[in-house]
Amino acid sequence: MERHDLALIGFGGVNRALAELISDRGSALTDQLGFELRVVAITDLRLGSLMQADGIDLAQVLALGPGASFASLPGGHPEPRNEVVIRNTTADTVVEATFTNPVDGEPAVSHVRWAIESGRNVTTTNKGPVALAGTELRALAEAHGVRFEHEGAVMSGTPVLRFAERMFAGLRVEGVQGILNGTSNYVLGRMEDGLALADAVAEAQQLGYAEADPTADLEGSDVQLKVVILANEVLGGSITTADVTRRGLSTVSAGDIVDAAAQGRRWKLIGSARRDADGSITASVEPVALPLEHPLAGISGPTNAVAFDTDLLGTVTVSGPGAGRIETAYALLSDLIAIDAGRRATVGEAAHA
Ligand SMILES: NC(=O)C1=CN([C@@H]2O[C@H](COP(=O)(O)OP(=O)(O)OC[C@H]3O[C@@H](n4cnc5c(N)ncnc54)[C@H](OP(=O)(O)O)[C@@H]3O)[C@@H](O)[C@H]2O)C=CC1
Ligand SMILES: N[C@@H](CC=O)C(=O)O
């Protein structure tokens, strides 16, 4: 049985959910996938770092209480030492799930770069490296013969990037429009129910939907990153966040939400990108009061949806979870499946050469 050894960078909601999945499902998951997953390193800001080449006992680390440190375990250290761990781990694949920095993507961009430079595959749910350094990191991965996978960077575990790459290969996508942030969509819905903004945000944090700084969710910078990723990967653009105009939810009051409901409308934070006649891309993030009959008006809670405008099929809409710890851990699993499929294809090609 083939095995992938993993180094988890960041041990918050998403990477913990991946560890739980591996630990709880055990051999049933191995049988289902046709390969084994083993965690050999973990780093985290608070817990420090842990390297055990024979495999970490995930049940043991998942049971560590508040204030615990990896320093008390064999192979443990009180500091994360990300660069030391990433460059020296026995893992073949680095799983990056630290916080998304919407300004320059750091420290995650460096984590991904170190992993690729040291010949390791990367899977990440972190939007920073993909949106802000995607071109560089993809080229680096190709040069080093490793994979850079990031399905969870848009719409969490809903496999929208791979869907677009594979299913739209023979047509032209002219534009995308969607609800691309679970937290803000959840918050808007709860405010329609009469909850105060702060209470709705606290619920979204508790449920594991929100960013470390939820301002990124509410004020649209998280959606700005996702629009950049969709524009560059699906529309073939090369835009940056500076090319995406942005207005967030602070421009919508509780009164506006009540008024919209009375008029048969619902506020949604809409991200969009469109290829213009001259080939350039126009992109934006803004709250829009959609009429109830609009296809995106019924997308509620942490669910997201993206509508692709295509030349041959008209509009194709994909909806599904846009946030959540387990849902996002599934995105990492789907990346690991893609990494394993790539490895098998390479082995197969070598055997036929
Ligand atoms: N949760 C979701 O629904 C989704 C999340 N994502 C993305 O996935 C990533 C992880 O999300 P999530 O798990 O929810 O976030 P969390 O904040 O729960 O987890 C991030 C973890 O990384 C740790 N960390 C921060 N900086 C470092 C560092 N330099 N070195 C080591 N560890 C570090 C944090 O420590 P500390 O808490 O001490 O800061 C925390 O434990 C984020 O980039 C997020 O944007 C993407 C799609 C959906
Ligand atoms: N905070 C984000 C998580 C996924 O990217 C969101 O709420 O959508």
Image (tube, grey):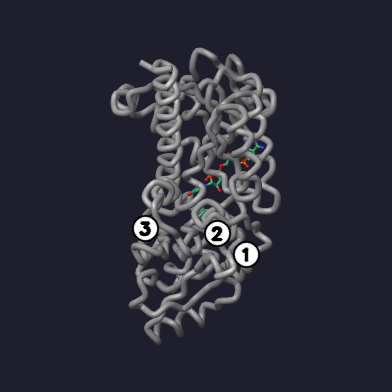
Q: Is residue 62 left or right of residue 239?
A: left
Dot 1 amino acid type: Val
Residue at the (43%, 48%) spot, across then down: 165
Q: Is residue 37 left or right of residue 221?
A: left
Tell me residue 106's x, y (percent): 69, 43
Q: Which residue is mark 2?
A: 227
Of labels 3 and 1, earlier in sequence is 1
Of labels 2 and 1, earlier in sequence is 2
Query: Mark 1 and mark 2 in contact (Cβ < 8 Å)?
Result: yes
Element marked by disc 3: strand
**Eyeballing the image, is 120 above or below 66?**
above
**Eyeballing the image, is 187 above or below 75?**
below
Residue at the (35%, 78%) spot, across then down: 292
- Which numbered marker is on residue 131? none
Q: Which residue is mark 3?
A: 318
Of labels 3 and 2, earlier in sequence is 2
How far is the residue under mark 3 from the one under mark 1? 22 Å
Report if residue 214 is visible in the image: no
Tell me residue 169's x, y (percent): 41, 50
Quarter, ligand 1: top right
Q: Nearer the viewer, residue 45 or 4?
A: 4
Q: Nearer the viewer, residue 100 or 116?
A: 116
- Ligand 2 near label 3 (Cβ, under 8 Å)? no
